[in-house]
Image (spheres, grey):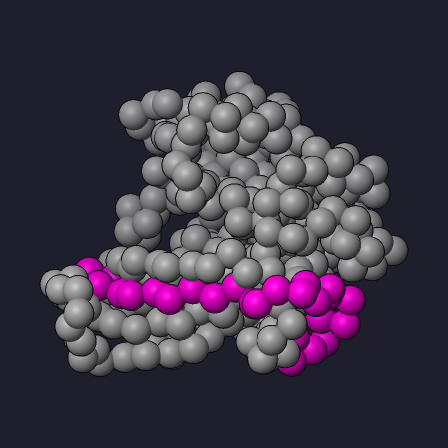
Amino acid sequence: MRRPLIVIGNVNVDIIVGPCQPWPQPGTEALVDHGEVRVGGAAGNVALAWDALSVPYQIAANTGEDHFGHWLRATFHAHAGRWPVAKTPTTFSVGVTHPDGERTFFTIPGHMPVLTTDQVMGMIDIALAKGGIALLVGSYLTDALTADYRTLISWLHSHDIAVALDTGWPIAGWTPQIVDTTRGWLNGCDHLLLNEVEATALTHTSSVAAAIDALAALMPAEAHIVVKCGPAGAVGLHRGERVTLPAPKVIPVDTIGAGDVFDAAYLAEIAVGSAFSDAIAAGIRTASRAVATLPRQYL
């Protein structure tokens, strides 16, 4: 039996152009090979992957009141009926990709900072969500929601919903305050899904192995910890079992949202009772396929 899945956080519009190298001089124009307007944000990327994998889910998010917001709600029409519409522009990001597959983003705050815990609670069909897993994403972009994460995590647990967390990278960097706040969430998390730079920065360590050990000391004994290492694969720890799996060699075309795709595939496997190592393998396999295809493919 499949456990219900929920993703909570940021859905926005991505405007992607590239590849571009070198960075243009101010006042000039650069011609690039590719441009695309698509659903973005960590929650949006996770939801798109679950759609592609035919995995049922709920999504709690918001939009602005402009044409971008209308487009996002139409895209997720089966899920967006309860989404609040903020009296702001819809958040969008302009992403410039580079020849090595990496990217630079420019993002406006828009609607995401005003999403609240009360709104999220009102969006989730709790009867359908019980016994499931809720993934919290975009933590450093959803300011009002993040400020009340402890309440949200307690509410989820009170309804027998496990909590998975992928914080993303804080815009202000890992300041002492952000580190302390983030560490304070970890004792309420059942799954932690970070990339290697986030994990080492959060723990002030210099290796993935040391970061995982430091994170384990802050989390429940039964927690699942996964550190995503890009082309090197991923490392996980659960109940003292350390799993290290490589990634297949692929030529990256578009790495935007790769970690979100990993999260989606990993949790889809956890939801059907797959072994921890098999869930990590699914995350690696699906994310590797996604970054190597344009238009994006997941299977």
Residue 299 in the figure: left or right of residue 139: left
Q: Give the range drawn in magenta.
A: 73-101
The quadrant in which residue 258 appears is: bottom left
The residue positioned 19% from the left and 60% from the top of the image is: 100
**Can see residue 83?**
yes
In this rendering, the answer to whether 195 lies above or below 296 is: above
> 159 or 74, which is in the foreground?
74
Q: Is residue 94 magenta?
A: yes
In this rendering, the answer to whether 43 lies above or below 160 is: below
Residue 10 in the figure: left or right of residue 176: right
Q: Is residue 98 magenta?
A: yes
Percent across and percent down for residue 43 are 57, 59
The residue positioned 49% from the left and 69% from the top of the image is: 13
Percent across and percent down for residue 167 are 51, 42
Quarter holding the N terminus is bottom right
Tally of numbered tags: 0
> 37 or 166, which is in the foreground?
37
